[in-house]
Image: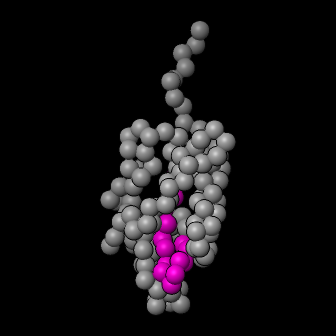
Amino acid sequence: MEWQPPFSPPSLPDRQQAGAEAELSARHHLEQHGCQFVCANYRSRRGEIDLVMTHHNRLLFIEVRMRRHEAFGGAAGSITYAKQQKVIACARAFLHHHPQFYNHDCRFDVVTLQRLQHSWQIDWLPDAFTT
């Protein structure tokens, strides 16, 4: 009998597909709560922001995190200080290139998704970190 590791991460295409599905689910969840979509996967040389949305004249920079289980702190626990700094730097680049949002207050939110059998458990964490 050949030895099999107890856990093998999904292949990159599967992981990318799951990530895209999670981001779309997060977007729909936020839209149901009154947010308006601005863009997805905004990239700068500083990093990437999963979702940019507006809500009551506030610009939201949203990090989407998906986990299969709650081990090691779950999805929210996976956002390190270094990751926060990358998101903040990328948000500054976004504002530099999109001056129409200068009059908006900005906020950094996190949306966590935990895979259930046939759906997602979605939690929206407003103001998850600050500059």
Q: What stretch is highlighted in magenta?
A: 52-65
- Percent position (x, y) of residue 39? 60, 73
The residue positioned 43% from the left and 45% from the top of the image is 74
Q: Does the magenta stretch include residue 62?
A: yes
Residue 1 lies in quadrant:
top right
Q: Which residue lies furthest to the front in this view?
A: 33
Q: Main secondary structure of the magenta part?
A: strand
Name the quadrant containing residue 41. bottom right
Question: What residue sits 51% from the left and 29% below the top?
Answer: 7
Rendered location of residue 4, percent (x, y): 55, 20
Location of residue 114 in the rendering, given as x and y in whole percent from the top left corner = 53, 46
Residue 104 is one of the magenta-drawn residues: no
Give the residue displayed 48% in from the left and 71% down from the top. 61
Q: Position of residue 53 (x, y in %)?
A: 55, 74
Q: In the visual, does 72 lie left or right of 42?
A: left
| Residue 125 appearing in the image | yes
